[in-house]
Amino acid sequence: MMKTNPLNQSRSHRVMLSIRKNWGLYLLLLPALVLTICFAYIPMYGVIIAFKDFKPAQGILGSRWADPWFKYFLKFFKSYQFKTTISNTLLINIYSLLVGFPLPVVLALMINQLSNQRFRKGFQTITCMPHFISTVVMVGMIMLFLSPGSGILGNLYRLAGKEAPNLMASATAFPSIYVWSDIWQHVGWDSIIYIAALSAVDPTLYEAATVDGASRWQKVVAIDLPMLIPTMIILMILRMGNLMGLGFEKVYLMQNDMNIRASEVISTYVYKIGILSAQYSYSAAINMFNTIINFILLLAVNQISKRLSSTSLL
Amino acid sequence: MHVKKPAKHRTVKLSGADLAFSLIVYTVAIIFLLLILYPIYFIIIASFSNPYAVSGGNVWFWPVGFTLDGYKELFKYGDIWTGYLNTIIYTALGTFIGLAVNIPAAYALSRKDLWGRRFLTFIFIFTMFFNGGLIPTYLTIQDFNLYNTIWVMVLPFSVSVYNILVARTFFDSSLPRDLWDAAQIDGCGNLRNFFGIVLPLSKAVIAVIALWTAVGQWNSYFNALIYLKDRQLYPLQLILRDILITNNVQSALGTGEAAQIALRLAALMRYSVIIVSTLPVMLMYPFVQKYFNQGVMIGAVKG
């Protein structure tokens, strides 16, 4: 019937036809969709336990609402861990941003200046390799090297005739150890994206600059650096959006009783409260608070960057 | 003469500055290279050295008191090999499932004629910025009876939105625009088109995603820490954590001098265990480097 009158097809009918014609595509999408719903959206619904006195035996729906509903948020705001975890998280993240953000750019600009192709290729390969060391091994290496009794650091101190400090037990050294070991591991890898951007520079720009008598340093500053700015902005937005979300894996492994003052961050605290001491609702509330702050930060930074430079993520 | 002289002077000065610039760049590069290489080199030589020489600070540039004791001790430590085997299983299965889930989804989302494409893409992207968090996810895993099974290591977290976006960008930019039209004329359905035509053209992006997933599986310990209870199921990284970080090495030897020796051997094992667990991944890298770099570049297009 519709075949005789194709122009009058209703919208819903056209949609039906399109879906039926492409049913294969929906089948291809299905596994990812089902897994996402099961293991990302069902847990999202599960965050309501942050507002309930959740008891595993009663289930999410069966558990009573907390009284008042923001009880566990209040508990976190009032706890002495509130200030500690948030300031530790922010401190490590900002430190890491200040050092870890510009260094890959500098490294990429430098690699771009290496004119010997074989050296350049070897250099890139070697600087990327530490990226593939696992977090566990990386922290193990840090501990081996910094051990005052038998590590490289201890040995260097002994050569100088001094007693080595136990840096892993020092709260003040914790952020630096965390950030600089991260840089050692990832700076080469993080520079790849900038090197890719540099390979897109139009060579005639360099020729024009040479004719104008620009030195190599001037070319780096005037041609190469501006080329990297859009990529830098995108990566900056992503990092700012994660300012409160410090990864769990490395901090948790580096933690010990002596440095806990500087090393307890939100994600490790959520783990300890939730998994180790089974205070499910409290842990979910802390985590939710954190996620919301991150989300707001991301949107804010994205808006600012949209205004300033018309580069945006979303 | 009067006009020419400053010009000549200028070019000479410039090339001198550029030469100095080159010199500085190469010097910094070589120092940087040493900073990256020495820690790795030290682990290698320490793993072949006498433990007393290592802890006494006598090992700097080459092995001292060459010994294979660290490796021998390692071979006797059964947990390592159970962990190794588990990790190989998780990596193989996890990579297969990761490809099977993410690549088809990416292709579907790359097709402009997929009705609801924007909304479906949003469903995935939203999970990058918002999630239920540790405890709700943990409870969900328990509800699905996945806790403490192999499946929790390879199935629930196999969807990677980042990988889907990378693959989608690849399909968008690298497949010929009229590929699907041509396939339709030949009477191909969507499934035959995907498996018969699209996949063979997409080896590069498949390699990229397979490598990323495999390295991620090999190196991660978080899911295992949260969702596994039996030591028999532990992947290599959790066993490594016991040896390297929590010092939780079981020794059959008693107290006194024997325990002292055990402690020394355990300390030595720490270097060899790093070599044995990390070398496969690091040595693989130079051979597959081009795929990794390609991946970063495809990803960079969309940011």
Image (cartoon, coloured by chain):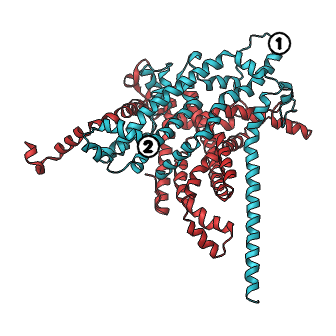
Side of B230 where A15 appears, left or right: left
Q: Residue furthest right?
A: A161
The residue marked by circle 2 belongs to what chain? B
Q: Residue furthest front?
A: B186
Q: Which residue is mark 2?
A: B167
Q: Determine the secondary structure under disc 2.
A: helix
Tell me the distance, in whole angstroms, between the alpha carbons under discs 1 and 2. 56 Å
Q: Which residue is mark 1?
A: B258
Question: At 53% from the left edge and 36% from the top edge, which residue is drawn?
Answer: B211
Picture colour for chain A:
red
Same chain letter for marks 1 and 2: yes
Q: Position of residue B63 (x, y in %)?
A: 83, 31
Given the image, on which type of amino acid does mark 1 rest? Ala
Question: At 76% from the left edge and 22% from the top edge, which residue is drawn?
Answer: B70
Residue A162 visible in rendering: no
Q: Determine the secondary structure under disc 1.
A: helix
The residue marked by circle 1 belongs to what chain? B
Picture colour for chain B:
cyan
Q: Position of residue A299 (x, y in %)?
A: 46, 51
Q: State which mark lies toward you, 1 or 2.
A: 2
